[in-house]
Image (tube, grey):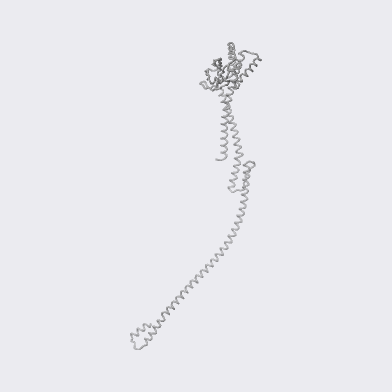
Amino acid sequence: MKIKAKILILIIATLVLFFFVAAYYLQTVTAKNNEVILKEDAMKIVKQIEFTFATGGENVSARTMNKNVEEMMYLSSHIISEESARVVKKQPDAAISEDRKTRIKSSLDENLEKLLYLSSHIARIDILAFHEGGSLSPFFSKVKRAIPYTELSAEEINEARSGRTVLKPEHTSDGKFIDVIAPLYYNGSIYGITEIKLSGDAPERLLTAKRQETMLMAFVVIAVIAAVLIISMDYMVNRPIQNLLSAISEVKGGNLDVSVKGKSQDEFGRLALHFNSMIETIRRSTDEKEQLLKQINRQNDELQYRIDIATEELVQRNDELSYANQSIYDIQKKLGHSRRLAAVGQLAATVAHELGTPLHSVSGHLQLLMEEPGLSDDTNRRLNIMQS
């Protein structure tokens, strides 16, 4: 696999991993922000309810309203601070009269109607009041959607009694909801519990839309980053590598006059500089070797000429030596023949001497016998035969 493909795969894998990590982080942060927004909306409703309890549901002047608002803000701050919530009293100083309750409910009905009309994700609001024995009873309810009331568990009631706000997700056949269970303060003490049921569909749709928009933006940004990285890697990595490979191919083909252009001061520039230096060294070494090879060839030619002359002289001398050897061989052959003749003559002389002496002796005695008188004719005939 080419390095360009490897780098491209690495870039794409890194960007995809970054995309998924960013998407997961964005989803987590958005979900948390959604919970925070829902909790803040619920706290605004709780503060409005506490303000209604503090004013008794009456229309007060601006100065009195500001004072009551400051008191309500101070009291509602205990909802967030658990340590501060523990110092407040668990029961109100005085019970609320029926006439005040009527005015509070009337004011709550009017104010919460506006809130439910403006807020599409609020399904219903339930207010529960504590009794002296610690039991809870419904105080007021405002329903926008026909959603059944969810009974509070003992743990949730205790959390609210301790001044803490609880967020509880709930899944029903009507959809997703988030219950915000918050303590209700009145005259510096926890008077009851406010349970606000928020629809999770609208925030979920908003969250989905934001997620899609963010994912699309992230995809576009990643595509742009990938394009920039690919073009940059092609310009900074692929082109220098291709130039170097092309130069290596030229050198492999025998062309030592090639050089790599490296203007940058990075690793590829230094690599091109070292490559050019290496080619220059090889070129000088090749030239020196060619000069040395030419000198060796000249010396070889001269040596071959001398060898040819010496060989010719040696062949001539060899021919002369062969002629001399042939002459010597002929002389040796003649000498051997003479020696054989001499040996035969010596043998003949020896044989003649060894045979001649007794034969001369026999011949002398035969002549003596032939000269004796009174020999018969047959004896003379035989003596002549022996003489012959």
The quadrant holding residue 230 is: top right
The residue closer to the viewer here, 352 or 168, is 168
The residue closer to the viewer here, 101 or 199, is 101
Q: Is residue 27 above or below residue 291?
A: above
Q: Is residue 285 above or below residue 138?
A: below
Q: Position of residue 146 (x, y in %)?
A: 53, 17
The residue closer to the viewer here, 126 or 259, is 126
The residue closer to the viewer here, 36 or 267, is 36
Give the residue at the far top of this rendering.
Answer: 99
Count of numbered circles on the image: 0
Q: Position of residue 133 (x, y in %)?
A: 54, 15
Q: Is residue 131 above or below residue 224?
A: above
User: Which quadrant of the figure contains the C terminus?
Assistant: bottom left
Q: Position of residue 385 (x, y in %)?
A: 36, 82
Q: Is residue 295 above or below residue 25?
A: below
Q: Position of residue 66 (x, y in %)?
A: 65, 16
Give the residue at the far bottom of this rendering.
Answer: 373
Side of 385 where 155 appears, left or right: right
Give the residue at the far right of this rendering.
Answer: 63
User: Which quadrant of the figure contains the N terminus?
Assistant: top right
The quadrant holding residue 79 is: top right
